[in-house]
Amino acid sequence: MSESPQPTPIRVTVVGALGRMGQESVRALSSDSRFEVVGAVDRSGAGQTLASVLQIPSEVVVTDILSECLDQHPADVLLDFTHFSSAPDHAMRAMKRGLAVVIGTSGLRQPDVRTLVQTCQETGQPCLLVPNFAIGAVLMMRFAEMAAAYFPHAEVIERHGHHKLDAPSGTGRHTATLISQHRAETPREPQGAVEAVAGARGAKVDMVPVHSLRLPGSVAHQEVLFGGPGELLTIKHDSYDRASFMGGVKLACAQVRSLSGFVTGLDAVLF
Ligand code: NAD
């Protein structure tokens, strides 16, 4: 009996390949036969092979020029873990070359998101922006969305390592937006409430306070607190290791081509 042929691996180019998330992703994708990492872009470490940096069997040479990499090494999916100032440009270049895009980079500006929506329409390519790849975090957001319908008083506390550049986190912002969309009313501050020190009540994202903590020893942690008369509901998620994101990274890379347009959240491919 002849064996059924192996499906062709999904070719992935990783931008920010030598960063913390990039390295973890390259390892995870390279060790799964459904994927082939065909390109690695990073503004540091150009000229080295992935084999020498990550000790994995790969002859891919890291480059710092994305367009050259995309032209020389055709890929199906671009995965970006860089910086909010450059991720939109990487995504647009990739979509214009016919790649589907997964953006893991957080902190993207609204005007950039609008441009990406337009690029998706113009190119017909999908772009999936994922604020958090951890399955537990996606469920936390889903549960928060459900609770918001019953508890309008909600606040978000997110905690990340002290090297994180943007605040609030993408997950914190996204959670706040979901809460505001699902609660029946927006609680009012008591009359005469004063913020004696700016920021004491957190940043308001869609009228939901988000408090950002930046501490060494943290990876990605979030609590969503809902207060009601005589009760408090806390929904909490902790990522202790970047390994927690890899299931979601693989799912996103495997499924992004089935999406259309610009989509936010792993929910789109999870549920
Ligand atoms: P990092 O600083 O360790 O890595 C970023 C890498 O990108 C670096 O190697 C840097 O040299 C490279 N880089 C930056 N700008 C570049 C450019 N223009 N061209 C090429 N390479 C460039 O950061 P990290 O911890 O890996 O995080 C990266 C991003 O991912 C951040 O925005 C972070 O908030 C986000 N993140 C998202 C999730 C998620 O689940 N969505 C989880 C963790 C981190």
Image: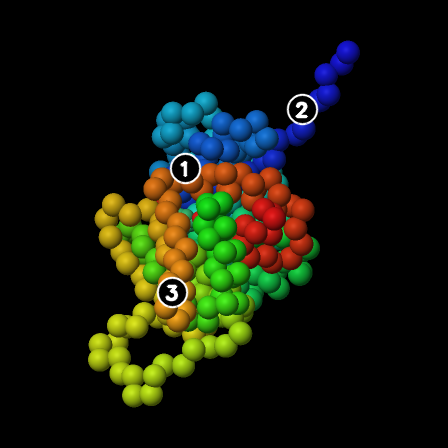
The residue singled out by tag 2 in the image is: 6
Q: Residues within 10 Å of mark 1 (few under 14, many from 20)?
A: some
Q: Secondary structure at mark 2?
A: loop
Above or below 254: residue 215: below
N-term-proximal mark, 1 vs 2: 2
Element type where label 3 sits in the image: strand
Q: For the point 36% across and 40% down, which residue is it? A: 241
Q: Estimate the x, y position of residue 71 in percent, counting from the top left.
A: 57, 42
Residue 58 in the image: state x and y as whole percent. 47, 26
Q: Is residue 137 left or right of residue 250?
A: left
Residue corresponding to mark 3: 231
- Asked whether 70 or 163 is in front, the reply is 163
Give the residue pinned by disc 1: 243
Residue that protrudes farthest toward the right in the picture: 1
Question: Does any atom of ligand 1 lie closer than 8 Å to the CB of label 3?
Answer: no
Q: Residue at x 42, y 25 (%)?
A: 56
Image point (46%, 53%), residue name: 140
Q: In the displayed image of the protein, which residue is found farthest to the top?
A: 1
Type of the residue with mark 2: Gln
**Dot 3 or dot 1, earlier in sequence:** 3
Q: Tell me the distance, in whole angstroms, between the alpha carbons under discs 1 and 2.
A: 26 Å
Q: Residue furthest front?
A: 230
Of residues 265 and 118, which is closer to you in this image? Answer: 265
Q: Is residue 175 above or below residue 137?
A: below
Q: Is residue 54 visible?
A: yes
Asked whether residue 92 appears in the rendered view, the answer is: no
Query: Residue flagged by tag 1: what amino acid is it?
Result: Ala
Measure the alpha-carbon separation of dots 2 and 3: 54 Å
The percent coordinates of residue 109 (x first, y second) are 45, 65
For the residue with label 2, is its CB less than 8 Å from the closest atom of ligand 1?
no
What amino acid is at disc 3? Glu
Expressed as whole percent of the image width and height from the top left, the position of residue 106 reads 43, 56
